[in-house]
């Protein structure tokens, strides 16, 4: 049986300022293009796994079966087809479906005919039906309509083209919904008697979206193919001169947070005050800018160095410490992020990795690589094109 187990609370980075990242555990860059800063279009996987294990915010482990995940895939597909919904809206819909029915299509004895439609069991909440527990009496639709996952998803997202427009309100009908918390938006649509329940399912919703989607290629906000990246004309040290010291080099070392445990440190740690600029090592394209479930805050940039693909990773930024988005083209020495201490870390620093050949190739000693390629020191970082605040 295929099983997707996601450790949502786990951290893979370490540092004395340090971090441990196993290159083989990071997906191919093509899978790293859906950023937390921007919403890339979503491509839903063709084959749903048999099982997904995830953990709620309050620490309860849940197991979702293939039927539940198939319903979730439909919810994602409908959301991905509506431009205004984006990644945030899909996560909110998944949170609502998990909270209301555990992502099950439920019939209801109030409407005996509902059992004649494909279903995953019988619910008993008033006259509520389906994944989002929508009520015919509240105007959400007929029994036949509400026993369809596709219809329920369309109704939940709502908007001018929604089947329930203008009432009951779907997600797109909530004024300024992007400025509310995810749980608040779910509650605004569901109008539940228990409004605080939704946030508990947020990490599970994130896990489902990660498991069932990969980013699409092409289009705005996404990284171009490697062949579209022009060769860089300059290599720089990823921190301004005089702003840092190397606190932990590449190589085997004792884990600073687990004394007695020795393992490989795949990067070089540059200790520096919180907020110190982080610079792009070379011209390139941002493949990932944000937090990935099961990881921490990272920035991944692909470069073309003398015709060879080289990928660099920058880690431990705070959520507000990004100045670029996925798909942005950056230049050598550009201020792309700020030093932080997010994740498995003992203090502010940059964890920096160099992967010649891409993620399929192992990381090398960044200090040696930079020296061999004549990296320059930078005193006046260039300003980034945009700032990403989340």
Image (spheres, rainbow, N blue to C red):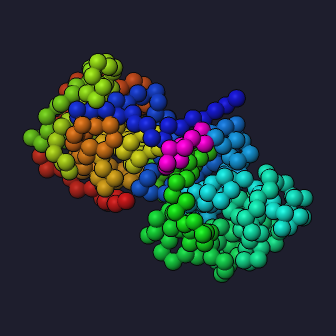
Which of 90/103 is in front? 103
- Looking at the image, residue 258 sits to the left or right of residue 158; the answer is left
The answer to whether residue 306 is visible is no
Q: Residue 343's image quarter?
A: top left
**Residue farthest along the bottom direction in this orientation:** 166
**Residue at coordinates 55% horizontally, 59% vertically from top-left?**
197
User: Seen in the image, is 126 located left or right of residue 210?
Assistant: right
- The quadrant of the image that shows the C terminus is bottom left
Q: Residue 328 at x, y = what percent?
A: 38, 52
Q: Residue 370 location, x and y as percent?
A: 23, 29
111 relative to 35, above or below: below
Closest to the observer: 10 or 2? 10
> Magenta segment range?
53-62
Q: Which is more toward the observer, 305 or 6?
A: 6
Please tell me whether residue 82 belongs to the stretch shown in magenta: no
Taking the spot 21% from the left edge, 42% from the top edge, the residue there is 348
Q: Nearer the viewer, residue 210 or 139?
A: 139
Give the residue at x 61% y 49%: 43
| Position above or below: 171 against 330 | below
Looking at the image, which residue is at 13% across and 34% down?
245
* Position of the N terminus by quadrant: top right
Residue 375 image position (x, y, % from top left): 20, 34
Q: Position of residue 227 (x, y in %)?
A: 46, 39
**Is 60 a magenta residue?**
yes
Q: Is residue 223 visible?
A: yes
Q: Is residue 147 above or below residue 214?
A: below
Q: How many marks?
A: 0
């Amino acid at each position: 049986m295929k099983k997707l187990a996601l450790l949502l609370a786990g951290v893979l980075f370490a540092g004395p300022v340090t971090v441990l990242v196993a290159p083989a555990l990071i997906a191919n860059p093509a899978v790293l293009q859906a950023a937390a800063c921007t919403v890339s279009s979503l491509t839903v996987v063709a084959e749903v796994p048999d099982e997904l294990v995830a953990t709620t915010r309050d620490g309860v482990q849940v197991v979702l079966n293939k039927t539940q995940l198939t319903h979730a895939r439909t919810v994602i597909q409908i959301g991905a087809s509506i431009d205004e919904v984006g990644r945030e809206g899909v996560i909110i819909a998944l949170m609502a479906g998990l909270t209301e029915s555990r992502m099950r299509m439920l019939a209801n004895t109030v409407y005996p005919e509902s059992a004649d439609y494909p279903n995953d069991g019988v619910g008993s909440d008033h006259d509520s039906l389906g994944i989002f527990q929508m009520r015919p009496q509240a105007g959400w639709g007929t029994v036949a309509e509400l026993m369809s996952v596709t219809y329920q998803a369309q109704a939940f997202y709502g908007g001018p083209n929604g089947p329930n427009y203008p009432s009951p309100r779907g997600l797109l009908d909530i004024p300024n919904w992007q400025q509310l918390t995810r749980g608040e938006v779910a509650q605004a649509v569901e109008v539940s008697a228990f409004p605080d329940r939704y946030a508990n399912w947020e990490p599970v919703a994130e896990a489902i979206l990660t498991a069932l989607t990969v980013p699409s290629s092409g289009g705005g906000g996404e990284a171009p193919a490697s062949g579209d990246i022009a060769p860089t004309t300059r290599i720089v040290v990823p921190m301004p001169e005089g702003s840092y010291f190397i606190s932990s080099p590449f190589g085997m070392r004792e884990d600073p947070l687990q004394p007695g445990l020795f393992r490989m440190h795949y990067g070089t740690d540059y200790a520096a005050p919180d907020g110190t600029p982080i610079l792009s090592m070379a011209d390139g394209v941002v493949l990932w800018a944000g937090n990935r479930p099961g990881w921490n805050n990272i920035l991944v940039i692909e470069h073309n160095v003398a015709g060879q693909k080289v990928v660099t990773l920058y880690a431990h930024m705070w959520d507000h410490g990004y100045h670029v988005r996925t798909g942005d083209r950056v230049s050598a020495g550009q201020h792309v992020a700020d030093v932080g201490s997010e994740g498995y870390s003992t203090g502010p620093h940059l964890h920096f990795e160099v992967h010649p050949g891409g993620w399929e190739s192992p990381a090398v000693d960044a200090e040696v690589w930079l020296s061999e390629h004549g990296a320059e020191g930078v005193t006046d970082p260039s300003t980034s094109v945009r700032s990403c605040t989340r």
